[in-house]
């Protein structure tokens, strides 16, 4: 099969790969680059488990072709902690019991990060709206909503 | 978290280390960093992808399977049929002598539900496997199907599963599991009111975020490592051993974190065929359900039909309860004979009733086999029972919570299936529920105790 060269940064690191034409970003991240934090819950753009941030925007890596990501800046939950220090969202998800089986968690955290990056002081309604593309089958969502609001508060305290 | 310490104060210890404490999950640091390893977070060079060809019919005879076009498709490595399976007929609970074996790993002459596995295609890529699977040609003779409990039990219904001979499971106690306690007819004769209601439920899909699947790697010494998200490792190991006629020490089953199960990953559906495929090809094999398969193929909670007949006195006492419970197993047993039996033991719920008569049936239909899901056998029973309790309370003009206090089981009461009640605490739970829900009940109910009249 014809290969396509693609080059982007993943969590700040330069990456270059030859990928199959039509290969999805999730497949390249997981199988070629070893970042298995995006999860394939449906592979049809309905569950949000594969969510990543591309050039500051929340995207579904199962519906994004890798070859369209040339020059892009890609962030995943796998690269969110810096030098072993957890991001406030990761800390809040732990403290608020916002993860059970954990399969939706990396996608949830990306959706929450995209929200807080553009809206540092969200209302509960803002959080619900921002997470509406991400399905969780274990928690009933309330602990996740609490975790995002908690992280937003701790962010604004740190900034003050 | 708060403990209501006034209940059972004489039995309480205050040096509890876990209860009443907020604890962090041991696995949550892995979850929030994306480091937790699920079975599919592994990639092996040379992996073959397995795609199942499934029945488009609820019930059909297979006249002919033509693999010629599919075999020629680029990237296809091998196609498996029932002829490749050493012991093709199985049933999960044969491990505890609940037979008969009633289900084919890959269909032979017939399919009995829409989605039944027939042919397994192995190819170098998922795309090639999907394309080749679409080229498998199967000639069917479509047969009449039964799609609900009532039509399955009709006298002239087509037989769903010849291994049973009739459209219900034959227990050692006969066509149903039975509970007989007191004299239910005498109870009805004495009752002030009798209420008979029928309740239906639909199948419910567990819908875990991670779909069912496994990856099998040959170890090169006729031993196979199977990375799986099964919830039932030993069901899987032992049934695979039977189906493949391989001793257990050849099967290195590796479980781990499951991305949600809720009972949907208790059946043995992907591992035997994937291990066989790895054995026959010498290559790693990945068999992972698509989201469509997870929703349509994996076994849901059974549909149920429940008939409840209660005799109740004006003072609130239930004096007789008769139950007919029907579990829709779909086309094969899986865990449903057990689920239906569990229902029999569960009635009449957490209430002490002097006269009880229960029959529960496990019924076969041409639907997706149903199986385990969160309290299967009792969850829908509780739905029906508690709706019935509200209706009974309304019938005699009584508060529904007070009505439950009157009938609640307490320590020392004999339950209908001859287990003495111990550690009930239902009265105390309802007292606390009354308080926190701000649903007041008369003072005498707040003075009751699970230990007796008080």
Image: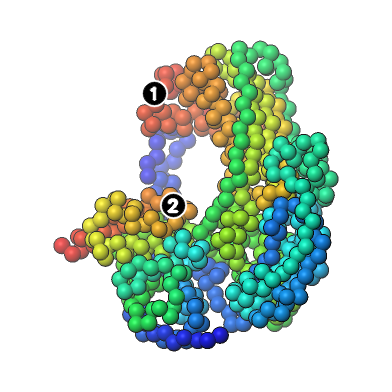
Residue to which mark 1 is pinned: B440
| Observer-nearest of A137 and B67 | B67
Q: Quadrant of residue B149?
A: top right
Horizontal arrangement in the rendering, residue B84 relative to residue B5 (left or right): right
Query: Which residue in the protein does label 2 denote?
Result: A139
Q: Horizontal and vertical percent for residue B310? A: 63, 22
Q: Is residue B256 above or below residue A126?
A: below
Residue B327's place in the image compared with B185, above or below, is below
Q: Secondary structure at mark 1?
A: loop
Chain ID at mark 1: B
| Tag nearer the camera, 2 or 1 | 2
Q: Which mark is residue B139?
A: none
**In this view of the protein, which residue sits in the foreground, B381 or B49?**
B49
Which residue shows up at 55% across the image and 21% down it?
B392
In the image, is residue B178 above or below residue A78? above
Q: Secondary structure at mark 2?
A: loop
Image-based side of B221 in relation to A126, left or right: right
Residue in front for this viewpoint, B19 or B273: B273
Q: Tell whether B360 sits left or right of A53.
A: right
> Where residue B226 sits: x, y (%)?
64, 70
Image point (81%, 35%), residue name = B155
- x and y percentages locating residue A149 in the rendered image: 29, 55
Q: How is the image coloured?
A: rainbow
Q: Residue at x 40, y 78 (%)?
A: A68
Please report the residue visible at 43 percent of the width from the left and 80 percent of the height from the top. A67
Q: Is residue B411 visible?
A: no
The chain holding disc 2 is: A
């Amino acid at each position: 099969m014809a290969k396509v060269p693609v080059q982007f940064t993943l969590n700040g690191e330069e990456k270059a790969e030859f990928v199959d034409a039509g290969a999805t970003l999730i497949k390249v991240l997981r199988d070629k680059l070893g970042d298995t934090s995006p999860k394939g819950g449906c592979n049809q753009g309905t569950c949000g488990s594969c969510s990543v941030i591309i050039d500051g925007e929340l995207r579904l890596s199962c519906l994004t072709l890798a070859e369209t990501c040339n020059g892009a800046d890609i962030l995943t939950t796998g690269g969110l902690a810096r030098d072993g220090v957890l991001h406030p969202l990761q800390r809040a998800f732990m403290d608020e019991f916002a993860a059970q089986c954990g399969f939706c968690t990396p996608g949830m955290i990306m959706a929450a990060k995209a929200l807080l990056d553009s809206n540092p002081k969200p209302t509960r309604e803002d959080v619900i709206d921002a997470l509406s593309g991400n399905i969780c089958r274990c928690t009933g969502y309330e602990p996740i909503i609490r975790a995002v609001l908690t992280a937003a508060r701790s962010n604004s305290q740190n900034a003050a | 978290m708060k403990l209501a310490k006034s209940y059972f104060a004489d039995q309480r210890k205050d040096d509890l280390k876990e209860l009443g404490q907020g604890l962090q999950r041991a696995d949550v640091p892995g979850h929030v960093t994306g480091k937790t390893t699920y079975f599919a977070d592994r990639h092996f060079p040379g992996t073959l992808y397995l795609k199942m060809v499934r029945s488009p019919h609820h019930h059909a005879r297979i006249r002919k399977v033509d693999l010629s076009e599919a075999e020629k498709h680029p990237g296809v490595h091998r196609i498996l049929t029932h002829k490749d399976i050493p012991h093709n007929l199985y049933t999960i609970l044969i491990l505890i002598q609940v037979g008969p074996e009633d289900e084919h790993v890959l269909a032979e002459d017939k399919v009995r539900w829409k989605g039944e596995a027939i042919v397994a295609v192995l190819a170098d890529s998922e795309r090639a496997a999907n394309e080749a699977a679409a080229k498998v040609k199967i000639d069917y003779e479509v047969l009449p199907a039964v799609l609900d409990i009532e039509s399955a039990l009709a006298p002239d219904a087509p037989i769903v599963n010849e291994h049973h001979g009739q459209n219900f499971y034959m227990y050692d106690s006969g066509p149903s599991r039975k509970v007989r306690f007191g004299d239910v007819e005498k109870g009805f004769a004495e009752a002030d009111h009798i209420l008979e209601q029928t309740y239906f439920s639909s199948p419910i899909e567990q819908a875990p975020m991670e779909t069912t699947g496994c990856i099998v790697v040959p170890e090169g010494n006729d031993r196979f490592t199977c990375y799986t998200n099964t919830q039932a490792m030993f069901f899987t190991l032992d049934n695979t051993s039977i189906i493949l006629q391989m001793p257990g020490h050849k099967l290195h089953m590796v479980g781990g974190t499951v991305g949600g199960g809720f009972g949907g990953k208790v059946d043995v559906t992907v591992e035997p065929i994937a291990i066989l495929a790895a054995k026959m090809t010498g290559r790693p094999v990945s068999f992972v359900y698509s989201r469509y398969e997870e929703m349509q193929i994996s076994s849901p909670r059974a549909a149920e039909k429940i008939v409840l007949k209660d005799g109740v006195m004006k003072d609130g006492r239930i004096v007789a309860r008769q139950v007919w419970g029907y579990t829709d197993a779909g086309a094969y047993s899986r865990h449903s004979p057990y689920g239906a039996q569990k229902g029999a033991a569960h009635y009449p719920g957490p209430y002490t009733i002097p006269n009880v008569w229960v029959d529960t049936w496990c019924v076969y239909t041409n639907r997706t086999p149903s199986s385990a899901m969160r309290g299967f056998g009792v969850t829908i029973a509780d739905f029906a029972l508690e709706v019935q309790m509200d209706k009974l309370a309304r019938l005699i003009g009584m508060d529904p919570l007070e009505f439950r206090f009157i009938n609640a089981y307490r320590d020392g009461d004999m339950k209908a299936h001859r287990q003495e009640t111990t550690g009930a605490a239902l009265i105390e739970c309802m007292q606390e529920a009354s308080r926190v829900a701000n649903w007041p009940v008369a003072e005498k109910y707040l003075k009751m105790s699970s230990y007796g009249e008080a």
